[in-house]
Image: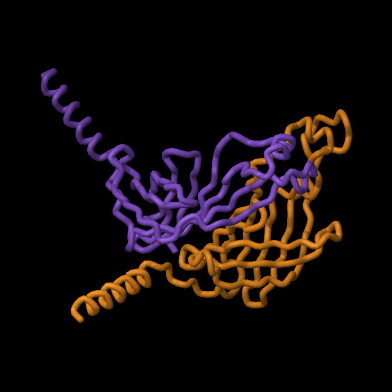
């Protein structure tokens, strides 16, 4: 009986330690945040690749975005780098385009079941080429939930989103 | 007279040295969350990336949560994998994994870098023991920590939650 009581006590202690140690569930944010994302790929292109047209406009190295938490919407703009068009034009290694990629796309947000210190978000939209695009990422709240660190789950992009 | 001047100079230099030393950073409480990125100069041209499929071509980003009160850390990793495609748009894909949950760590004032805290921890991933040996450099009144790993090319920032 005494041993059983000890086991019960140990289990209760372990459960309570586990509960204390777990990160607190982050509160779902309200309002809106705006931020920047940058591609972190280790695949790089040489100037010769650029001249050969191997960098396409789909290779978006920067994105800026606005998340409306209250309405569950996201706007995304991108700065797209692609190969220079004219052979022998050595004034620029690549050409930069800026475009609004999507406006008022539906954003789904929930607490991540895997990364308990973060939110998981996803959004689907049709890109400028008419292709369906699905983005999935983590929003990691810091700074009293005024700053969110962003890491995409299905693409090599990271960045930050700051409450407006 | 020269002796007095020398003594005065020595005293002044000693006093200056004492006041110039960084104050010992306080051991943090609460928790911080952050992102750590690989800063290696090793990269892959598309042809090499294609040939490397289906392997990892880098582990560029790690999300981190440090619970200072309970000395537990949580890590997630976003890895880039070669797909084997030669198309520039599909040459790689990202995969996000959980690396560590409630892994223990220790933290102390660094004896070498006196403006920083040294963090050491271990966790097991895919039956292999992995180590974290890094510096946390407090700034912004102790609410922001710059992170520098000491044995691999990773650095980043951790911000109090």
Q: Nearer the viewer, residue A32 or A9?
A: A9
Q: Nearer the viewer, residue A31 or B67?
A: B67
The residue depicted at 39 percent of the width and 48 percent of the height is B136
- The quadrant of the picture occupied by the N terminus of chain B is top left
Give the colour chain B carries in the figure. Answer: purple
Give the colour chain A carries in the figure. Answer: orange
Q: Is residue A95 visible?
A: no
Q: Nearer the viewer, residue A32 or B72?
A: B72
Residue B158 in the image: x percent, y percent?
Answer: 45, 54
The residue depicted at 27 percent of the width and 47 percent of the height is B24
Looking at the image, is B108 positioned above or below residue B10?
Answer: below
Residue A46 in the image: x percent, y percent?
Answer: 73, 32
- The quadrant of the picture occupied by the C terminus of chain B is bottom left
Q: Is B7 positioned to the left or the right of A28 in the image?
A: left
Q: Residue furthest bottom?
A: A1
Q: Residue furthest top?
A: B2
Residue A129 figure quarter = bottom right
């Amino acid at each position: 009986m005494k041993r059983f009581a000890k086991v019960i006590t140990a289990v209760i202690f372990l459960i309570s330690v586990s509960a204390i140690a777990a990160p607190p569930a982050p509160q779902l944010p309200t309002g809106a945040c705006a931020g920047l994302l940058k591609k972190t790929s280790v695949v790089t292109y040489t100037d010769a690749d650029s001249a050969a047209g191997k960098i396409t406009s789909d290779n978006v190295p920067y994105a800026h975005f606005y998340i409306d938490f209250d309405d569950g919407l996201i706007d995304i703009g991108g700065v797209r780098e692609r190969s220079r068009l004219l052979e022998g034009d050595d004034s620029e290694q690549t050409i930069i385009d800026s475009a609004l990629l999507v406006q008022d796309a539906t954003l789904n947000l929930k607490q991540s079941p895997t990364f308990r210190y973060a939110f998981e978000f996803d959004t689907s939209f049709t890109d400028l080429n008419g292709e369906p695009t699905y983005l999935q990422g983590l929003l990691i709240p810091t700074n009293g939930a005024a700053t969110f660190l962003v890491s995409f789950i299905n693409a090599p992009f990271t960045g930050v989103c700051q409450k407006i | 007279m020269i002796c007095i001047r020398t003594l005065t100079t020595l005293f002044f230099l000693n006093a200056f040295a004492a006041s110039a030393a960084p104050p010992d950073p306080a051991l943090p409480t609460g928790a911080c969350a952050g992102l750590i990125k690989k800063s290696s100069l090793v990269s892959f041209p598309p042809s090499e990336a294609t040939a490397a499929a289906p392997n990892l071509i880098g582990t560029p980003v790690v999300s981190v949560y440090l619970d200072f009160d309970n000395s537990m850390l949580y890590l997630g990793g976003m890895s880039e994998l070669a797909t084997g495609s030669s198309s520039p748009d599909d040459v790689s894909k990202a995969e996000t994994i959980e690396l560590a949950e409630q892994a223990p760590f220790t933290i102390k004032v660094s004896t070498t870098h006196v403006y920083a805290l040294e963090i050491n921890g271990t966790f097991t991933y895919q039956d292999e023991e992995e180590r974290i040996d890094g510096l946390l450099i407090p700034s912004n009144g102790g609410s922001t920590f710059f992170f520098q790993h000491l044995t691999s090319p990773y650095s980043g920032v951790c911000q109090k939650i």
